[in-house]
Image (cartoon, helix red, strand yellow):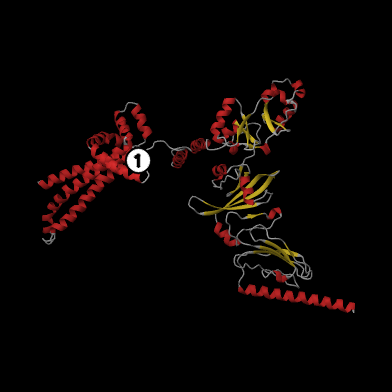
Amino acid sequence: MIELLLLFLALLMVLGCGIFVAAEFSFITVDRPSVERAAAGGDRTANGVLHGLRSLSTQLSGAQLGITITNLAIGFLAEPAIANLLHDPLESVGVPSGTVPAVAVIVAMVLSTAGTMVIGELVPKNLAIALPMRTARSVQGFMRGFTAVTRPAIAVLNGAANAALRRMGIEPTEELASARSPQELSFLVEHSAQAGVLPADTARLLRRSLEFGEHRASDVMTPRSTVHFVGPDDSLADVVRLVRATGHSRFPVLDAATDEVIGVISTGQLLRVPAPKRADTSVRSAMRSALLVPASVDLDSLLGQLRGSSQQLAVVIDEYGGVDGVVTLEDLVEELVGAVDDEHDTRTAPVREVVPGTWELSGLLRPDEIRDAIAVELPEDEEYETLGGLIVDRLGRLAQVGDVVRLQLYDEDAAPYEVELKVLAMDDLRVDQVRVTVHRDTHSRNAHDGKNFDGNDFDGNEGGRDNRDANEGRRDINAGDANAGDVDRTATRGDTGDRDVNASDVNASDANAADPSTGDVDTTAARGTGDRDVNAGDATTGDVDTPGARGDIADTADRADRANRARQADRAHRARQADGENEAGEQRG
């Protein structure tokens, strides 16, 4: 009878442990804004939960104290009771009487621990995670009452723990921070969209809104090179013609003498002047003052300045006082909702997919816009702001049509892939159109090409330059006329160790040799990591044949064969020189 009473008390302790565990997890996982809304609506239990959240550290300490007390009580009550109840059954099944007490205690410990874990720990934990609001409402009264009774003990224990934290340089807090940073909110929005809770368009708008204030005027401005300016002494008729040609409604007025923007002229000011008088009216007499902003101003502040000045265009000034570009209200709206075209805009898509894995992009796109458009994370740096700037930065010079930049990137799973950026069109000195090709089979391409891409490899073949690779030290060798005897070696380019070598002496290259009699071209050997691009010519005529193959294709026999051919060609060359000298000597004689 006593054993059953002890088991009943132990069961009550298990239930008490479950309440403390449920309170602990529900207070942590409950959505505080939902609790605050319910409390504001007059829900008394939600108001109790809110009071508990305001002293969360104390409530959690009380829960931990309660869990510890109930677990000790369960062990004290359940284990001896279960052991006594198991004593006779164990003897009846043949367990030696000397070992019965030990076996009974071990079995009792396992059963009580398992029961406590399942009923007192796991079930209430999972319940609190699944239904945090309902669970918190159910346990908040009991939890707050227990905390009030045991507050002295909690204060002592919390004080000791807080003192230890402060010695480690950490300041403890009483409640969880309910505020979230823009980055955290963006992550929540993205996670909600992936889970299907938010529509993709809504998630995109929310994320852009959260990131809006992180951008600067320099990020969204129209650069000076593409801005149409008017002069202060131009006539309004000139401006009308410019409006018809460009479709724009506002133009900054640039004083050519000082290279400063002194105002802005809009179609609204044009319409105020009768058409017959526009040819005789100067821009200076009709313009209004311009809003000048630094390139570093954030978009939140810029939007406020545009609204406060009742203007729709701001002139961006760089740190040296020069004109950097212009920003319009439409630019700011597009930063939130995406591209907005009107009837005058040229409908040229900044992103066009050519084939799967290949796109043609505007060189003015920023890396974050490219990420949103084609899910490719291009590297960002303070040295550039656009795709064209990235290409110029990697080339180390002004770009030309045909230039290629290769980048080694990594996806979310840390798997490497290669992105190839090829310049398709230039607008004066600015990169206008770029072809972006994503190669997911980077390793197989490297093995095939015999190249190692380190993120800085670039190729300008179509622009009249030879392939360059900073890691390979490749050479381009042209085997010319063996009789000419002229050797032309170009200087080493950059720090890559690459060379273009035009060698008439076939011995200048052991990687490729031409048959002196037939002009047949042998394949190219790749020695170590120093791959070569070889153009082999006829050894007698000097005509250049097609480039030799590149790659790791040479074996020992091929090298020996090429070396033998090289020696034969060299002997033939020396013999022809000797014959020529003999003939010259006979003629002189």
The residue drawn where x is 22% and y is 41% is 16
Kindly indicate the quadrant of the structure image that contains residue 126.
top left
- Alpha-carbon neighbours of circle 1 within 10 Å: few (<14), some, or many (≥20)? few
Q: Which residue is most to the left?
A: 1
Q: Which residue does the numbered mark 1 point to in the structure image?
A: 172
Task: Relative to 287, say whether 222 is above or below.
Answer: below
Note whether 141 is above or below 553 in the view shown.
Answer: above
Q: Position of residue 258 (x, y in %)?
A: 71, 33
Q: How many marks?
A: 1
Q: Which is nearer the eye, 31 or 126?
A: 31
Q: Is residue 463 above or below residue 581?
A: above
Q: Position of residue 466 (x, y in %)?
A: 68, 58
**Occupied quadrant, residue 198:** top left
Question: Can residue 492 be seen by looking at this rendering?
Answer: yes
SS at badge 1: loop
Q: Position of residue 22 (x, y in %)?
A: 28, 40
- Amino acid carrying label 1: it is Pro
In this rendering, the answer to whether 248 lies above or below 97 is: above
Q: Quadrant of the C terminus?
A: bottom right
* In-image side of 416 versus 115 (left or right): right
